[in-house]
Image: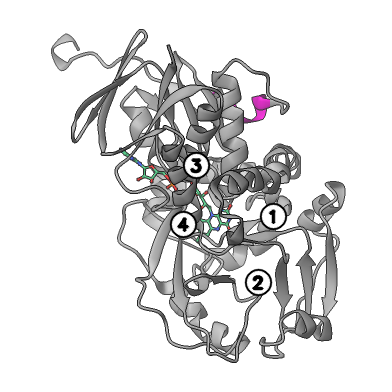
Amino acid sequence: MAKTISVIGAGSIGVSSALHLQQRGWQVTLIDRREPGQETSYGNAGIINSGSSIPLNNPGIHKSLPTYLKNKSPQLRYNIKHLIQNLPWAIQFLQNSKTTQALKSTAALNELTSRSLVEHKAFMQNAGNMHRLKELGWLRLFRSGNSYNPDSFEAQNHKLYGIPGSVLSADEIHDLEPSLKPIYESGYLLEGAASINNPGALVKEYAQKFVSDGGNLLQTNIKSLSVDGNHIECLTDNGPHTCEKLVIAAGPWSNDLLAMLNYRVPLNVERGYHMHFNLPEDTVLNRPLHDVQRGFIMCPMEMGVRVTSGVELNNRDAPPNYAQLEQVKPFIKEAIKLGDATNDPIWMGRRPTLPDSKPVIGQAPKHSNVFMAFGHQHIGLMTGPITGRLIAEQISGESNDIDMSAFAPERYVRFEGRRKPIWQM
Ligand SMILES: Cc1cc2nc3c(=O)[nH]c(=O)nc-3n(C[C@H](O)[C@H](O)[C@H](O)COP(=O)(O)OP(=O)(O)OC[C@H]3O[C@@H](n4cnc5c(N)ncnc54)[C@H](O)[C@@H]3O)c2cc1C
């Protein structure tokens, strides 16, 4: 009889987990209230870069803190009430930016990012969507008054992990991207980086492959979860769904699902936005670019040019605040000739982030049949397939070739015991 398992969340992480489990002979049910790849995994910048192992909370953040505290920066803004309510998270996040901790997080994340491209390529070959991938690198660009700093924490770690890159002059930038206006005095090309021309479609196509190979896709909302020995019951909008094993891969909503099993986890979100512009016929953008000083990323996509914003620390469910996107709009026009915004709505997403910027990948502390894979902050599109492999290997009793203690749920996931009914308190 086939081994059965359910996965909650059909984003990059859940779809990848479902595919890897399926490849290992599991009969998998993938559950999401939306179509696959329509939440955080839809609207990101689509970059796959082994050098993205450097967490945002690295020693470099200390220099920028006085600017960030003014709360006017396109790179990082915060809602003060949210920050106060989440002070323990904010303090731990900053503590993890100290050199020793940041080096540890970088080393662990490098195990994921360095395997991302090869794992995606294997999925793309199976799903027949290799055309979504471009391997032309990722540009970091500097206007006057700044340039690539070879002594930065990031640069030093890129050197340590052999991340290929080269410093560019203004002329070299022009050779790579002739449509850019001559405002950038220098740049840095992350040569090994790749990009995806439609991240949402990529994940959706992976899910279609999962279904065509016999996987079961269930579009419904999970309202509650309970575990009784080997029996897991998910109460959905369409009635109960039972399974023997479960993977929680619900991105920024994973803490809600874990709370149903009486786990607490300090999962916060770094909100981010995107909008799409048409490019005039005489203008081409070949690869993603990051305007370091002005704090935006611009990437060529199937649907036009996608501009993504920096980080907003705010409540996951608070209404969108488009201030950072509004702030960068004039700067984008300084960089390239843009057409109008497309008809696509401005998008808001929530990067799920734990205080040490590492995801949780592994077995639930108190339930041997519940597994979790979430908290992939800025790198969850690229690290989906490798995360899927690691969790599927664990569940299937195979050994991982990565030290998984760095991603152990026990770091943050606390079991608070079964709550007594109110009449027993
Ligand atoms: C602006 C921005 C730019 C980014 N750029 C990049 C980048 O260039 N490269 C990169 O690798 N990453 C990038 N990221 C990060 C990346 O998008 C995320 O880390 C990743 O998408 C997280 O994937 P996930 O599968 O964990 O979550 P999601 O994609 O959010 O999937 C979780 C799923 O769970 C489902 N779900 C939740 N609760 C329930 C429930 N109760 N019942 C049923 N279903 C439920 C949701 O509907 C959702 O589909 C960026 C993020 C942002 C915001």
Q: Secondary structure at mark 2?
A: strand
**Residue nearer the viewer, 11 or 421:** 11
Sequence-wise, which precedes: disc 4 or disc 3? 3
Q: Residues within 10 Å of mark 1 (few under 14, many from 20)?
A: many
Sequence-wise, which precedes: disc 4 or disc 2? 4
Q: Secondary structure at mark 3?
A: helix
Q: Nearer the viewer, mark 4 or mark 1?
A: 4
Q: Which residue is mark 4?
A: 201
Q: Which residue is mark 1?
A: 49
Instruction: Judge left or right: residue 95 versus residue 151.
Output: left
The amino acid type found where label 4 is placed reads: Ala
The total of numbered circles placed on residues is: 4
Highlighted magenta segment, given as a residue range: 404-409
Q: Is residue 286 visible?
A: yes
Q: Residues within 10 Å of mark 2 (few under 14, many from 20)?
A: many
* Residue name at image x 63 percent, y 79 percent: 285
Q: Residues within 10 Å of mark 4 (few under 14, many from 20)?
A: some
Quadrant occupied by the N terminus: top left
The percent position of residue 312, horizontal first and vertical second, equals: 46, 60
The amino acid type found where label 1 is placed reads: Asn
* Residue name at image x 49 percent, y 17 percent: 365
The percent position of residue 101, horizontal first and vertical second, equals: 70, 39
Sequence-wise, which precedes: disc 2 or disc 3? 3
The amino acid type found where label 3 is placed reads: Trp
Instruction: Judge left or right: residue 33 versus residue 145.
Output: left
